[in-house]
Amino acid sequence: MFPPLASGYRVDVTTDTPVLVALRNDYEIVVEGLAQMLAPFSERVALVELDSGAPVARPADVVLYDTFGQPQGEHLDISSLQVGPARAKVIIYTWALEATLAATWIDRGAAACLSKGLPAPVLVDAIERVHAGERLVLPAPAGENPRGRWPGRSEGLSEREAEVVALIAEGLSNEAIAGRTHLSINSVKSYIRSAYRKIGVDSRSQAVLWGVDHGLLAKRSRRPGPDEERFVLP
Amino acid sequence: MFPPLASGYRVDVTTDTPVLVALRNDYEIVVEGLAQMLAPFSERVALVELDSGAPVARPADVVLYDTFGQPQGEHLDISSLQVGPARAKVIIYTWALEATLAATWIDRGAAACLSKGLPAPVLVDAIERVHAGERLVLPAPAGENPRGRWPGRSEGLSEREAEVVALIAEGLSNEAIAGRTHLSINSVKSYIRSAYRKIGVDSRSQAVLWGVDHGLLAKRSRRPGPDEERFVLP
DNA sequence: GACGATCACACCCCCAGGGGTGTGGTCGCG
DNA sequence: CGCGACCACACCCCTGGGGGTGTGATCGTC
């Protein structure tokens, strides 16, 4: 469908100014982890962060949407991610990259779907290619797995466990978490059980408090309120 | 058992220095409410607050233990409330004052059990009498009901509803809340149902977050940790 | 006197939550 | 190559949580 990028390949983009990239995720530590990962490439990609509540200094060329704890799946509303007067190109940055879902997102207007398993140089190349007009779907190459940071990682939670606990800390039910993460409710329950063992709680209320204490809450300013427009799950 | 104080009665305590009173409750707004109620009587009672994490300037003569969200019932460990080199006299300040429970507390070493329904002048009189050596059990007189402040009052929660939500926000189960408040689990469930309607949540996780957002958490410094000695429920 | 609010509690019922156990796949490491 | 971790999911089972409805008492307000 879309030719995958071979490892080490670098697109030849003849431009002097870096691509303006907005990182889009409600968890500060996720955004910080991505920013740290991209910092060595600041001559090629410059980060402008949205959703901080303050107006952005300049609009983004590309939005990099990290799916951690965010709506994902076939109902994801791509157009709401395209912000600014010049509608930014949207890259879905996800762990579980399945072909049919990626195709749906591309049909809906995403410019690219990239796996979190990509090394940073490949990610930067891909951002530049998207900026230049290409459409990409890049699964993680075998053998390379530079994982980012996520909340709860230092407490021994895997990324999926942390994501599930983060959504519990947001007050979601198992069914809502399954919808948000595009997993089955049985998978969600499995992650819940193993996460509870790791963080040493035995009830959902205690998990909520653990999440609050360990920064697993999305930014309060990003909480959907009655007046706040956000992309909505059906 | 103990002669109740008539409304308006004032004990004749011939002393010039005020009674040093420690207010004892883990919720700041409860302690603030009590302090405000007693502020006009500062020539008679001087407040020294314990459990703030800082060493107190001087030891208390009397500890006023507000039962909101705290262990209450026949297993309450009175001796752990008596702090300082000169063991302070303990007053249990509770809403539901039943005679047999009050008798148990007095047997266990409490100097007095006072109802929260008492007017401030009567409360101050009682504190002075306790300091002077008397033992009291004072139910609320009919017709007078100067309620203090409690968390959630401005959101329309009654004191018992607020207490139950505060304990949910601490991660307790219904059974644990029933034990802590000395109520039946059916009463706890009734308060939960009515509180959920008032605060607009429909799950326990959301109630925990509501409590966190509205200051219904006990002071974190007062949370029992592995090294921190506190009175323990069996 | 009637009514509403609060406190206290009982009883019935349904289901979400979470425990256990199991399967299968991929991948990194010793 | 074997093992453990992680991801994904299924199935069974029990219980706590919470919805509904009801009772009774006290108290303040109209």
Image: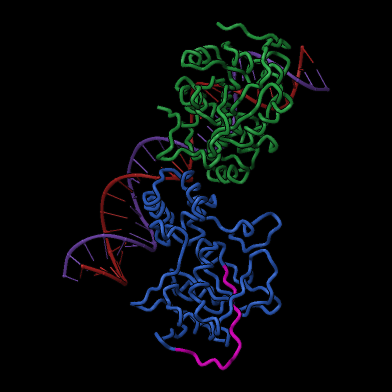
Chain colours: A blue, B green, C red, D purple
> Which residue, as the protein is rendered here, is positioned at the far front?
B16
Decide if residue A53 is in sight here.
Answer: yes
Principal secondary structure, stretch drawn in magenta: loop
Left or right: B137 in relation to B178 = right
- Using the image as rendered, state which of residue A30 and residue B17 is in the foreground: B17
Q: Quadrant of residue B203?
A: top right
Left or right: B11 in relation to B130 = right
Q: Quadrant of residue B149?
A: top right
- Using the image as rendered, state which of residue B224 and residue C6 is in the foreground: B224
Q: Which residues are magenta?
A: A10-24
Residue that appears at 63% across and 21% down:
B19
Left or right: A44 in relation to A82 = left
How many numbered discs sit on the rendered protein?
A: 0
- Using the image as rendered, state which of residue A120 and residue C3 is in the foreground: A120
Q: Is residue B28 highlighted in magenta?
A: no
State which quarter of the image contains the C terminus of chain A: bottom right
A156 above or below B35? below
Q: Position of residue C10 (x, y in %)?
A: 50, 21
Residue that appears at 61% across and 42% down:
B215
Residue that appears at 57% across and 36% down:
B166
Q: Quadrant of residue A78?
A: bottom right
Residue that appears at 46% across and 16% down:
B108
